[in-house]
Amino acid sequence: MSFSSLGLDPRILQAVQEAGYTDPTPIQAAAIPAILTGRDLIGIAQTGTGKTAAFTLPLLHRMALATPAPRRRTRALVLAPTRELAVQIEENVKAYARHLPLTVATVFGGVGERPQINALRAGTDLIIACPGRLMDLLGQGHGDFTGIETLILDEADRMLDMGFLPSIRRIIRGLPRQRQTLLFSATLSKEIETLTAEFQHHPEIIQIGRRSNPAETVAQWVYEVPAHLKPGLLGHLLENPALSSVLVFTRTKHGADRIARRLDSLHIPCGTLHSNRSQNQRLKALNDFRRGTLRVLVATDIAARGIDVDGISHVVNYDFPPHPEDYVHRIGRTGRAQAIGDAISFVSSDDTGALRDLERFIGRPIPRQKAETFDLSAPAPPRPLEAPSRPQQRPQQRRPPSPAARTSPTAHDPSIYPRHQDPRRRQQQQARRDPRST
Ligand code: AMP
């Protein structure tokens, strides 16, 4: 199937061609004709499948065809969970609408309100917004959404996870009942079904690929590694230049900062993406990563949601995600569209349960891999505090560090652990719970 057979406005087809797309992806081939009929739609598709264009192209077509209202009013609203995703959707929309006389703006927190208020008051044709800030500005009386023809809920599952349901409800209550509502989600959960029952009218469901299965193009494997050796293993893997554009996921923002400091000390260009960073810092890190100035970007799940960077060679799950859905989203960052990518997961003994759950979820085992020249037998760092009140604790048997561990500055660095992951602290907690076990 070609784009031209979809019946889209020639100005949109021209922009698609200029974007370098030749054929529609499966979600585009299925969703575009359905959306053009004006029906409500639920699209179950992972990130990286081309779902942004799947809803944007027919949306722009319908907006280009319809006669604009005499007074400028906002005609389409896209709700997205994070600022990064909102910015990316905006970039996509601007590229596909470059030959159309339509206006686009974003509304999200962490930046000044004034330009967003101006955009709302001007009746910008298409607004892409995060629910929190939009609620605030609508609450202050800005924006006229009585002319909304289309509402799109993108990554709806994540918006629900992030607790946006009350804001979404209040925003939708202010929209015309007569509208087209499109909902995209990586998974079809009970909560999503409730949301669609509330806000959609006989939606058509389009599901691409098996539900929640990671993108087929991503090669995945696991390194079994004790938690204290993860920094050393990451440094070791990064000695391989094939890891040219690497997105590293951590559970916490402090963990992300620690890894970034470590990589800085190894002279590996690296940035971070998490909610303690300002919007400008986040956008700069993302742009530098996109341009290749940064080889590594260390991110937390929420901050990395929806980021769209072509050519990510590897995703590294430095901290294994507790929920299979997060794994699917993380590895969807590489292997986007037709590209090939690799996903590497570090799995320590604490993660074996989560790994088993994931393998059950995706319906197949993930191959285990050994780093050929990396010494996995280096001992955990020494305990700084031996509790004097616990004479029953036998002093830990320590083997002399292996040559690899001696030369690796990362292997013994106690500063790399978040408190709850520090193996020494865990052992102490365990000893406190059950003194016999030590
Ligand atoms: P998305 O799933 O919308 O985040 O898109 C993932 C990536 O695929 C983005 O970099 C898009 O620019 C790209 N893309 C979208 N549609 C196509 C297409 N038909 N052919 C090639 N690349 C595409």
Image (cartoon, rainbow, N blue to C red):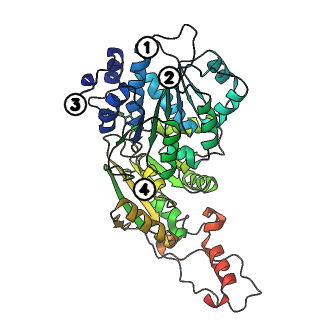
Q: What's the mark number on residue 149?
A: 2
**Is mark 3 in CB contact (under 8 Å) with mark 2?**
no
User: Closer to the observer: label 1 or label 4?
Assistant: 1
Dot 3 alpha-carbon crowd within 10 angstroms: few under 14, some 14 to 19, many 20 or more: few
Q: Secondary structure at mark 2?
A: loop
**Is mark 1 in CB contact (under 8 Å) with mark 2?**
yes
Q: Position of residue 76 (x, y in %)?
A: 51, 24
User: Closer to the observer: label 4 or label 3?
Assistant: 3
| Cα gap from disc 4 to disc 2, whole angstroms | 52 Å
* Residue 4 visible in the snapshot: yes
Residue where numbered disc 4 is placed: 239
Q: Is residue 214 above or below residue 9?
A: below
| Cα gap from disc 3 to disc 2, whole angstroms | 29 Å
**Is mark 4 in CB contact (under 8 Å) with mark 3?**
no
Looking at the image, residue 190 sits to the left or right of residue 431; the answer is left
Q: Secondary structure at mark 1?
A: loop
Q: What's the mark number on residue 66?
A: 1
> Residue at point 42% right, 62% down?
358
User: Closer to the observer: label 3 or label 2?
Assistant: 2
Residue type indicated by callout 1: Ala
Label 3, ligand 1: CB separation under 8 Å: no
Mark positioned earlier in the residue sequence (3 or 2): 3
**Nearer to the camera, 111 or 325:** 325
Residue type indicated by callout 2: Glu
